[in-house]
Image (cartoon, rainbow, N blue to C red):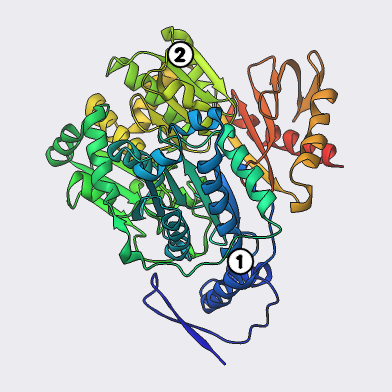
Amino acid sequence: MSINHQNPLEGNYLTMTDSVYCDAASCWKAILADHASNRHLLADIERFTRENQSPATVVFGTSGWRGETGTDFTFRNLRVVTAAIIEMFRTAAPETRAALGASGFDEIKQRGVIVGHDNRFLGPEFAREVMSMMREAGIRVFYAGEATTPELSAAIDRLGAACSINLTPSHNPANWSGFKFNPADGGPAGSEITGVIESIANRMMPDGAPAIEPDSLESFETIDPMALYEDFLNKRGTIDLDGIRDFIAGNDCVIVVDHVHGASRNRPERLLGASPKLRALRTGDDVLFGGIAPEPSAKNMAALVDMLRGEKNRFRLAVLIDPDGDRVRFTDGARDISMNHFGAMALHYLYKHKNIGGVLVKSVATSNFGNAIAERLGIPVRERPVGFKNFRPFMLPDAPQRAIVSYEESDGITGFNNTLEKDATFGLLLAIEMMAATGKNLSEYLADIEAEFGAFYPERAAIVVDKAMAGPVLLEKLASIRSEYTVGASVIIGDSAKTITDVITMDGTKIVFDDGSWLLIRPSGTEPKVRFYIETRSPDEQAAMIETARRMTLDALG
């Protein structure tokens, strides 16, 4: 027997037959190995996702709960997490209610929950399940449809909603699904909330949550998240939308946005107006993202760099945005500019050109380029662990120390008076403003700043570890690095020896050397990986520094 399922993102039918695959993991391996030929196997993935009753351990990492679709992230386990959130709403202790920003369950029911999703496989179906359970519990539900993470953050503010749920694993590959929860301030939930959700969900997990017949999407109250986001930008006033529109209309420019088949598609045109100067790439429906990991990596940026090198316009800008619109990377054809450099540029621009004061907030894994600028300009620096949830104290409107800009090396940024979430659209708009205000392309502006404050050369890499090693076991093994490499010790890096001047253990192990270079080793909060972050004062030393970090990690893992 075969069952036909319409795939709303492809406009055709997937035929599911008796599968040769015994689980979703092996099926995904086949799909990702040849996405063009094996797209039909998505029907089997849907079956596994609906039928798999295996429990999973729920962990909210740096940005939500994530799992492989059909393996860990199933309809059964999605119901458990949703049921856990509803129970948290009902039974929240005073400290949890304070973190949620609501006095109790009655207020949450009245203010409502916003639910959206990116445009990857089964997003609308997952949303139906979550919204139907919320409605059954008496909670008002707003359906945002396909939306970016910062749009939902802005929508909370404009609607006065109690919270939002975005069904996305952000930049992860096509075989992943995810669940982001944002409380009433619009920022990513901190551990005081996610710890409660984890505790309840993992207690419920063995028994599961009752299955329901989900309501149709059409039955829910819908919102336009992009209209709410535009209203939010205008109310907050950090970004000058009219000035950006005037710049595009009046200058010889080209602006290219690669959406990588993600939820940010059509957004720039809605904000800035249709124009031949504004080009959009990869806007079509493709839940497999053309077979790539849809992240703003150097590899994925290469085509954009080459494209702009051939353009003759006076002003050139291209960006790549990840599927849920919270990560962005830049080029003008002359340089590939990651957030390590762009975040520092944003600090300089907002402080010098827009007269915005405050502090610089960045992750410990991010380049010290911003530190050098801040030190010279007298701006305090606040370094935090990786994850935007750790930036919240400096992003709130009533914060005693407000961030001029907050960013981390993984291409996430927000700025003064903007959303508490990473916001790729904010980054795009800020980049255009920079060109308008300075009369320079980004690489030209960056070169001026480097000439004044010095050049920094950051890079990152990672190794994959077995899922069984993730968690406490991995943390324990990596902790041995900090006991072996201590202040005063000498480390051979390439052909030279460097002396350790500081060991920082805020988020992993960061080893700082006597010439200002450093490396950081930490486990990923969202994937079974160990990540290396390095920075040198010469580009010729990058490869050797990465190899040193890799060697340290492999030695620690045994």
Q: Eyeballing the image, is 99 above or below 176? A: above
Q: Is residue 445 above or below residue 115?
A: above
**Which structural element holds mark 1?**
loop
| Side of 272 where 209 appears, left or right | right
Q: Which residue shows up at 35% across the image and 24% down it?
A: 416
Q: Nearer the viewer, residue 121 or 77?
A: 77
Q: CA distance from mark 2 to mark 1?
A: 46 Å
Q: Quadrant of the C terminus?
A: top right
Q: Is residue 506 visible?
A: yes
Where residue 259 appears, x then y in whole percent? 37, 53
Crowd rating for badge 2 (residues with CA inside 10 Å; few <14, some 14–19, many 20+): many
Image point 16% across, 39% down: which residue?
245
Tell me which residue sits at (53%, 28%) in the image.
94
Residue 430: x %, y % from top left: 31, 32
**Residue 70's disc number:** 1
Would you say the residues marked 2 and 1 are in contact, meaning their CB atoms lie under 8 Å apart? no
User: Circle 2 is placed at which residue position?
Assistant: 374
Mark closer to the observer (2, 1): 1
